Amino acid sequence: MDRTLFSTRGLLATLVAFGCLMVVACSGSESADTTATTELQNGSPVPTYTGPGTLHAIEATTQLHLEGVAIGVGNIWEEEYTPAGENSRRGLTAGLFISVEKDASQNRNLRVHSGQEVIIPGYRLQVISVEPQRMNLAVVEVAE
């Protein structure tokens, strides 16, 4: 047998094995979801959340996919906002882009800030914090 054939097959097998390892290693990275923790992410701690629902960290320009709803986050900047029942303050706000699979009339684009609550079909969202590159959001399932 020709040595070139064996070396080509060996190289091909190595590349295929490497590709399979990369698929397995990256398969869990599609979701933007996280649970409450104090581990560092991008240099800043994820807040500890003890309220109802599940805490999700959504990176800017990405989406969180729930059952029948996609929630995108982006356009994060500092500006004046007024929390319900409080005085105006300055802080980070974010664009929240809601897409409802079965009812496009429920789709919304909102500016949100820490402490704000948003009701969408099947869920109640609580904005825990807005950071320069992500938003931490508690998601509570609600009966429709």
Image (tube, rainbow, N blue to C red):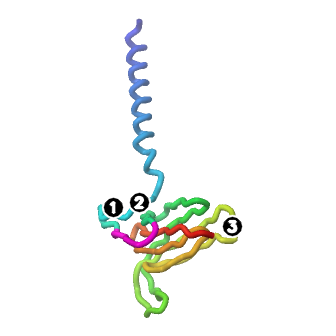
The chief SS type of the magenta part is loop
Residue assigned mark 1: 41
* Kind of residue at disc 2: Thr
Earlier along the polypeptide chain: callout 2 or callout 1?
A: 2
Earlier along the polypeptide chain: callout 2 or callout 3?
A: 2
Residue sitting at x 41%, y 8%: 2
The nearer-to-camera label among 2 and 3 is 2
Q: Marks 2/1: CA distance?
A: 10 Å
Residue sitting at x 54%, y 59%: 65
Residue assigned mark 2: 34
Q: Residues within 10 Å of mark 1 (few under 14, many from 20)?
A: few
Residue 23's disc number: none
Marks 2/1 in contact by CB < 8 Å: the verdict is yes
Q: Marks 2/3: CA distance?
A: 27 Å
**Image-quadrant location for residue 142:** bottom right
**Image-quadrant location for residue 119:** bottom right
Q: Is residue 136 above or below residue 113?
A: above
Residue assigned mark 3: 104
Q: Residues within 10 Å of mark 3 (few under 14, many from 20)?
A: few
Quadrant containing the C terminus in the rendered view: bottom right
Marks 1/3 in contact by CB < 8 Å: the verdict is no
Q: Would you say residue 51 sits in the magenta stretch?
A: yes
**The magenta stretch spans which residues?**
47-53
Task: Estimate the x, y position of residue 90 in percent, counting from the top left.
Answer: 40, 86
* Kind of residue at disc 3: Ala
Residue sitting at x 41%, y 72%: 51
Q: Would you say residue 132 sits in the magenta stretch?
A: no
Task: Estimate the x, y position of residue 127 in percent, counting from the top left.
Answer: 45, 74
Earlier along the polypeptide chain: callout 1 or callout 3?
A: 1
The nearer-to-camera label among 2 and 1 is 2
Q: Please state which of residues 19 and 31 is positioned toward the viewer in this rendering.
A: 31
Dot 2 falls on a residue whose secondary structure is loop
